[in-house]
Image: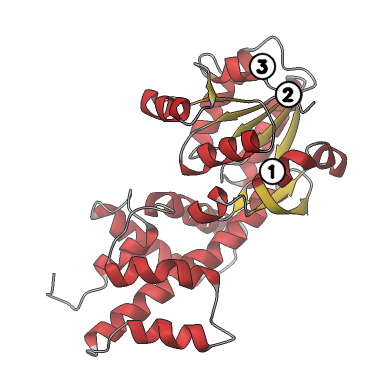
Amino acid sequence: MKPPIGVVGLGIMGLAIAKNAQKAGFQVFVSNRSAVKREIAKREGLSVVNSPMEVAERAQAIIIMVTDPAAVEDVLTGRDGIFSSKNIKGKTLIQMSTIDEKSTLEFSESTNKNGMVYIDCPVAGSKKQVEEAQLILLAGGMKADLLKWDDLFKAIGKAVVHAGPVGKGSALKLCMNLIVAQMTTALCESVALAKVQDLNPEKIFEVIKQSPALNCGYFQIKEKTLLEENYSPAFSLKNMLKDVRFMDAVARQKKLPIPVTQAVKFLMEGALTEGLGDFDLTSISALLKPAGKK
């Protein structure tokens, strides 16, 4: 019999992860601060409880999928947080939120002090990949700890990349999101450049599809979004900006020049100021207009 699993955080990613784990035969308990998202989870047939503490009481492994370090901290140590449970020793915490390595190491230390195993496991993939259980899990931790939950990882993703000890999963995630951030801005600028030349931007994607070097799943996913200018979020701009700020902070600390990423940060901060934070990160296209044109 498969051990019970918990998921705290029921956004696009957390809800789909919980549903895929349940489809694979795991009993899944879920929680979210928002009552609206708890109701959605109930309609999806998931077992909803009222707090992270209640999730920890029932589950042997608890996945956290929330926004940022402050949200992770609240899940762990806030009122009715996981560490409030008297029944967590020997259980596993699988932290999947995208956060920085420094925060990851701090959370790992406090988790271990509470008698739990900590797995650092952010994911590569967005809405389509998580819904199809095709995530790539970027794991930091002991190999034996990862192997213990191999069936769970196979239920929600297609591959596990062991990045090294705890902290290196989060470090790898920032490296991967740097590529995504720059690919996105490059594609958006390319479409904008086509438009000012009175060139149909569909031609860009026609070339991409014929190019062995450029044809990739990510560009295919963003084609419809950009051509239709429909920026419903698959990966919100504000969440990518959070990650880009982490990249910039690490680079500054290590005295590493990353000028293109810093330019991306500047562009995304402008989009956030314009109220685009909750839209897809491709919404930066709304800023790429000739001077004086709205």
Q: Nearer the viewer, residue 239 or 102?
A: 239
Kind of element beneath mark 2: loop
Instruction: Determine which residue is flagged by label 1.
Output: 155
Q: Secondary structure at mark 3?
A: helix
Depth check: give the residue in front, 94 or 172. 94
- Of the 4 image quadrants, the one containing the C terminus is bottom left
- Please indicate, yes or no, whether residue 145 appears anywhere in the rendered image: yes
Label 1 vs label 3, nearer the camera: 1
Indicate the amino acid at tag 1.
Ala
* Coordinates of residue 116 in the picture (x, y in percent): 75, 24
| Label 3 close to label 2 by CB (< 8 Å) | no
N-terminal-most mark, 1 or 2: 2
Above or below, 202 relative to 126: below
Say the numbered circle drawn on residue 46.
Answer: none
Residue 138 x %, y %: 69, 52
Snapshot quadrant of residue 19: top right
- Separation (CA) of disc 3 from disc 2: 7 Å
Q: Residues within 10 Å of mark 3 (few under 14, many from 20)?
A: many
- Distance of label 1 from label 3 (alpha carbons): 20 Å
Q: Which residue is mark 3?
A: 58
- Mark 2: few/some/many CA within 10 Å (<14, 14-19, 20+): some
* Amino acid at circle 2: Gln
* Secondary structure of residue under mark 1: helix
Asked whether, in this view, residue 248 is left or right of residue 116, the answer is: left
The circle on residue 60 is: 2
